[in-house]
Amino acid sequence: MNQWPDGWTDEPRDRYGRGSAAPEPEGARVMRPVRRPDVPPQSRGGYDDAYAGGHPDAGPYDSGYSDGRVYGGGHGDGYGGGRARPDWRRRSKVGLVTLLVVVLVWSVGTYFWADSKLRREVDLSIVQDRPEGGEGTNYLIVGSDSREGLSAEERKKLHTGSAEGKRTDTMMILHVGDNGNTMISLPRDSYVTIPSFTGSESGKDFPARGATKLNAAYAIDGPTLLVRTVEYNTGLKIDHYAEIGFGGFANIVDAVGGVEMDIPRDIKDKDSGADFEKGRQTLNGEEALAFVRNRKEAGSDLERTKNQQKFLSALASQTATPATVLNPFRLYPVMGAGLDTLIVDEDMSLWDLASMFWAMKGITSGEGTSMNMPIAGSAPGGSLKWDMAKVKQLVSQLKADEKVTVTE
């Protein structure tokens, strides 16, 4: 009994697709092209009319495969199926905008992070009898022998000693102006007058102390009396104050990977821990602190201040670089190391701080003047007497923001 559907038999089939008895299957046969009837476009009903709608004049449905065309009508652009070519210009714009947003968020976040770490502890508004200001900005930069935050082991390693309180190890005036920046070291042994003052903590009035060494002002009543003493003896108004201790100084040097210096001669000083051979070398934090504190071997306080100027300028030069500023893996450690121990006045902004460092860097590259306060000779107790005629001329040029022509 034939169980195949109508028209089928169980006899051997000899057509492709119907069970050919040949040992190998036949190749695919190409179908004859089927053309659509020439129907005007306005009268064509598309798929619904020609195929499903049963239009009486429409020809048989053409699948679109009969003439060998690729389904989807490829455009030859490698994106078959009618996909649109990617809009790379638009994608680039979106990527650029995204990058700018990320940089902006990072910058704002860094600013507020750094701003929150600034220790604005010095109130310059309580300084008495201040001179009139001039052109440009004047910073009083102080390196103190503060041992704050240092363990007993760190104090021993850095040769800081264990004295209580704080004293000034370094004092400089940095003038930032349009006609060149000027860095002026104030020897700690400068013979100056400490004027009358009101205690920053007690609020009591104290009479003038008379002539003594400059570093005594800080020891008596801290930053505000030091600022008052500098202004009283120079007539130059100090706009901003910045102070850093031993630990912060050493940490900054280590954070930037050390500072390269050209040591002028062999130096050995057991008090500061300095032990250097002549020549160019990279100093780590411990070595850098020993170099700037070396006093006895240096021969005089004036030579010591010059070493401090050279080193601080070199440090600023290596810190204020794109490699540090634009690299968060270097920027954050450097800023963290410095800001944790940096004490500034209440009105100091991050912009002011950046301006100070960039000015110091400029002096290193020869775009400014580096000098000591002009000295006339020795004074009682091994102190140094200022050449007041030159000091007056120097201050006049700084106030007018003129190019400094005064020599030491």
Image (cartoon, rainbow, N blue to C red):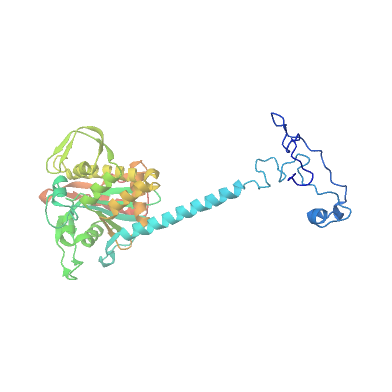
The image quarter in which residue 167 lies: bottom left
Horizontal side, residue 168 vs residue 327: left or right: left
Q: Quadrant of residue 146?
A: bottom left
Instruction: Confirm whether residue 180 shows in the render.
Output: no
Residue ID at (21%, 32%): 278
Q: Is residue 241 above or below residue 373?
A: below
Give the percent coordinates (x, y) of residue 143. 23, 51
Q: Where residue 200 sits in the image (x, y, percent)?
A: 21, 66
In front: 111, or 395?
A: 111
- Residue 408 in which image quadrant: top left
Q: Is residue 281 above or below residue 130?
A: above
Residue 92 in percent (x, y) is at 56, 48
Q: Position of residue 294 (x, y in %)?
A: 17, 43
Residue in the foreground of this view, choosing between 53 and 6: 6
Q: Is residue 343 above or below residue 21?
A: below
Camera sees residue 321:
yes
